[in-house]
């Protein structure tokens, strides 16, 4: 067995995949897995990728979690060299900075449909 991807649901798979293609330099659509309701993208080295599936009744999760709202099922951790620069770039590409930031060397952002993801520097990993 080999894990090939994590799948994120969205109202429009193509639009969310396009955001992550802009966010993750060098990544591309894998093989023939590009359609209106399913897109699979991978890093240049061919490692584990991300897939996106259209879900017509998608409800975005709430960050931080609340018991009466849609729960976050997973989130992505993306290591960056320059946290402030990459946070600004992610926001310019369509992400939103989350109101709650639990760690100094991590930035929690929400992708265009509300999935939380974290940008972090190696410093954050060393301090944990």
Image (cartoon, rainbow, N blue to C red):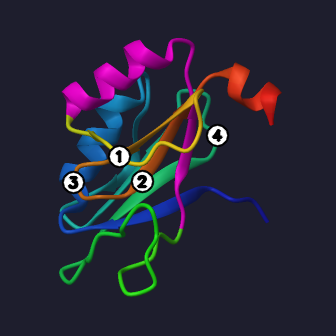
Start-end of magenta stretch: 74-93
Return the residue nearer the eye: 18 or 119.
119
Q: Which residue is mark 1?
A: 98
Determine if the magenta segment contains residue 65: no
Q: Identify the element where label 4 is drawn.
A: loop
Place of residue 4 in the rendered image (x, y in percent of width and height, measured from the top left): 62, 56
**Mark carried by residue 47:** 4
For image coordinates 46% across by 70% down, the residue present is: 65
Q: Distance between the Cα atoms at labels 4 and 2? A: 22 Å
Q: Are marks 3 and 1 in contact (CB under 8 Å)?
A: no
Q: Using a 10 Å C-alpha cutoff, classify the residue at mark 2 as few (fewer than 14 neighbours), some (14 to 19) or many (20 or more).
A: many
Q: Are marks 2 and 3 in contact (CB under 8 Å)?
A: no
Q: Are marks 1 and 2 in contact (CB under 8 Å)?
A: yes
Q: Identify the element where label 2 is drawn.
A: strand
Q: Which residue is mark 2?
A: 116
Q: Distance between the Cα atoms at labels 1 and 4? A: 28 Å
Is 117 on the left-hand or right-hand side of 16?
Answer: right
Q: Distance between the Cα atoms at labels 3 and 1? A: 23 Å
């Amino acid at each position: 067995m080999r894990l090939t991807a994590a799948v994120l649901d969205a109202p429009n798979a193509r639009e969310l995949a396009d955001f992550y293609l802009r966010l993750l330099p060098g990544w591309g659509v894998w093989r023939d897995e590009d359609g209106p309701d399913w897109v699979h993208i991978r890093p240049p080295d061919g490692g584990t990728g991300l897939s996106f599936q259209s879900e017509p009744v998608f409800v975005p999760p709430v960050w931080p979690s609340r018991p009466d709202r849609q729960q976050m099922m997973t989130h992505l951790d993306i290591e960056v060299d320059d946290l402030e620069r990459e946070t600004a770039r992610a926001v310019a590409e369509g992400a939103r900075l989350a109101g709650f930031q639990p760690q100094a060397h991590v930035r929690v952002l929400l992708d265009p449909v509300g999935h939380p993801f974290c940008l972090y520097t190696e410093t954050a990993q060393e301090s944990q």
